[in-house]
């Protein structure tokens, strides 16, 4: 399942359930080296999504119990 940068930012906030081989809860993905969710905008234009290379995004995330998983192994989310 391909998860974009915007989705990863949202997943870090809402902590959805994701299925790898079993259902686990998303804990966090380290996005400290990635662009922000949206670039700076004005009052009317709320900012554009930043440009990035999908290959440059982190490939792992941690669940709520602290175990690390590969993002490419995610089958579904809810």
Image: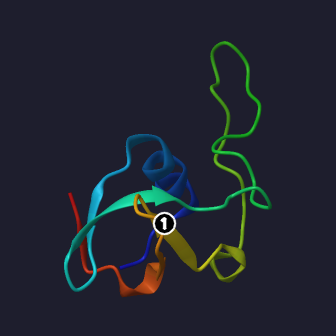
Name the spot of residue 68 as percent of width and height, x first: 50, 77
Quadrant location of residue 47?
A: top right
Q: Quadrant of the C terminus?
A: bottom left
Name the spot of residue 26 as percent of width and height, x first: 39, 60
**58, 69: nearer the viewer:** 69
**Vertical arrangement, residue 52 with respect to residue 41, above or below:** below
Number of numbered tags placed on the structure image: 1
Residue found 33% across the figure and 79% down from its top: 74
**How did the renderer colour the structure?**
rainbow
**Vertical arrangement, residue 37 with respect to residue 1, above or below:** above
Name the spot of residue 75 as percent of width and height, x first: 26, 80
Which residue bears the numbered disc 1?
66
Residue found 80% across the figure and 61% down from its top: 33
Relative to 19, 6 lies left or right:
right
**Vertical arrangement, residue 19 with respect to residue 39, above or below:** below
Relative to 3, 57 lies left or right:
right
**13, 38: nearer the viewer:** 13
Name the spot of residue 21 as percent of width and height, x first: 22, 86
Label 1: state its secondary structure.
loop
Disc 1 crowd, CA 10 A, few/some/many (<14, 14-19, 20+): few
Residue found 75% across the figure and 54% down from its top: 35
**Vertical arrangement, residue 71 with respect to residue 36, above or below:** below
Residue found 57% across the figure and 62% down from its top: 29
Q: Residue furthest front?
A: 65
**45, 6: nearer the viewer:** 6
């Amino acid at each position: 399942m391909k998860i974009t940068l915007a989705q990863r930012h949202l997943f870090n906030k809402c902590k959805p359930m994701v299925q790898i081989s079993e259902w686990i809860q998303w804990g966090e993905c380290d996005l400290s080296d990635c662009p922000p969710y949206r670039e700076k905008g004005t009052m009317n234009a709320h900012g554009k999504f930043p440009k990035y290379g999908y290959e440059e995004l982190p490939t792992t995330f941690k669940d709520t119990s602290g175990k690390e998983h590969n993002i490419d192994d995610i089958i579904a989310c809810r």
